[in-house]
Amino acid sequence: MWRAFRAYGVWALAALLQATPAWATVPLPAEAVKVFAPLSLEKHILRWDGLFIGMSLRQLDQVVGTQVATPYPQHANLCQGFTVRRVLHGVALDIDLIGPPSEETVAGIFIHWQGATAALTARELVPALRRAIADLVYRPSLHAPELAEQDNPMPLFQLKDMAGMVIFLKPGEGFYLGMAACLG
């Protein structure tokens, strides 16, 4: 009986190793691991370092401290809201807010790369992102649909089972997480 279990175990291990994606076996740059470490998906809520999609402006102020909420047109906010620049732990954030005054909620966050992270390519960043959040579905570019995930210099990922939530990597600048409709 032991031999049967051992044989099954060897077969199962071989199948698992064969199913391991290539990105999971590559050593990850420490900078990439560090930038995605605060990223999580908890109970269908996308979070980064205490911030989450759907939080109110008041909750945002509690996390980052009250800062002047002046509109900052860094990138187009297609959700008919406005974008504000905030800083958290020395990291610049462009935060898309939607909703009527006094009821604004966070629809998206663009986290700007810092230091050595800005020099990383998508090939170096994607494995670290997938380690942080495994349930990602690659969405090919509308402009170049033939590009495979590993060849796309600015890949877009949808969160599995969450059609409206995306993570967009823009090497050299930063990454966006939030509602797909607000990505400009």
Image: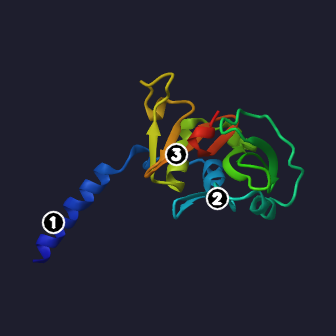
Tag 1's secondary structure? helix
The correct choice, above or below, for 170 with respect to 59 in the image is above
Point out the tag, 1 or 3, that comes first from the N-terminus: 1
Tell me, yes or no, whether the two marked residues, 1 and 3, touch with CB atoms within 8 Å: no
Numbered disc in front, either 2 or 1: 2
Query: How far across and how far down the image is residue 14, in percent?
Result: 25, 56
10 to 87, vertically: above or below: below
Q: Of residues 90 and 69, which is closer to you in this image? A: 69
Q: Tell me, yes or no, whether the two marked residues, 2 and 1, touch with CB atoms within 8 Å.
A: no
Identified by mark 1, the residue type is Ala
**Pointer 3: what residue?**
164
Q: Residue furthest top?
A: 143
Q: Quadrant of the N terminus?
A: bottom left
Which quarter of the rendering shows the C terminus? top right
- In the image, taking residue 7 as reference, residue 149 lies left or right, namely right
The circle on residue 7 is 1
